[in-house]
Image (spheres, rainbow, N blue to C red):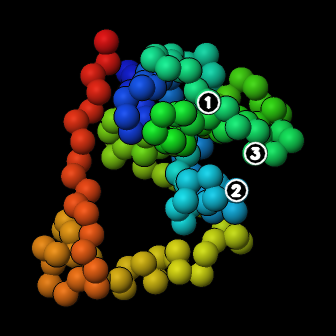
Amino acid sequence: MQEQLTGGCLCGAIRYVVRGQPSYLTHCHCPTCRKASGAAFLTWLTVRTSEVEWRGEPLALYRSSAAVERGFCRRCGTSLTYRHESDPGEIDLTLCSLDQPDSLRPEHHTWWEYRLGWAVPEVLANLPTFARSMEEGRLPPRRRRREHAPHAEAPLE
């Protein structure tokens, strides 16, 4: 078991520390998670609410359905949490908001029947890959894209 996990939003206004063992690491393909993240699926990990220590700005909250509240950074928009009223003692955190998202591995896909037709392993595995940007790869770019450089992580205080 890891001693603790740290993470936060893109701009660094919200930081968190998790002390405890995450469970239920899943790629969620439901339409609501896709819409909330703007991605083909959203990867979550579940922890006990009491095992998360929040630092910095408070989460902005959005009730995405009668029983679900999602938390995000009001400054940069990073999606950070999901809470269902049926289990107030647990909270889901976006796995990729961790400082070291590679330290955990998703265990399964949920809401698979709602997956996008192109978001399946056999399709994704056949797409060209580039170590960084298309401009640095072998295929000619269709349009100029801004480079997405990694940003410095905000230190925990």
Q: Can you say whether 129 is above or below 48 in the image?
A: below
Residue 69 placement (x, y as % from top left):
73, 36
Residue 112 placement (x, y as % from top left):
66, 68
Rendered residue at 45%/26% (across/down): 14
Amino acid type of disc 3?
Answer: Ser
Amino acid type of disc 2?
Answer: Thr
User: Is disc 1 placed on a helix, strand or loop?
Assistant: strand
Front residue (pair 61, 44): 61
Q: Can you say whether 9 is above or below 37 in the image?
A: above
Residue 26 placement (x, y as % from top left):
57, 52
Label disc, if present, on residue 103 of the rendered structure: none
Rendered residue at 71%/72% (across/down): 113
Q: Are marks 3 and 2 in contact (CB under 8 Å)?
A: yes
Label disc, if present, on residue 60 of the rendered structure: 1
Residue labelled with disc 3: 64
Q: Is residue 98 visible?
A: no
| Mark whose residue sits in front, 2 or 1 | 1
Dot 3 surroundings within 10 Å: few (below 14), some, or many (20 or more)? few
Disc 2/disc 1 C-alpha distance (Å): 17 Å
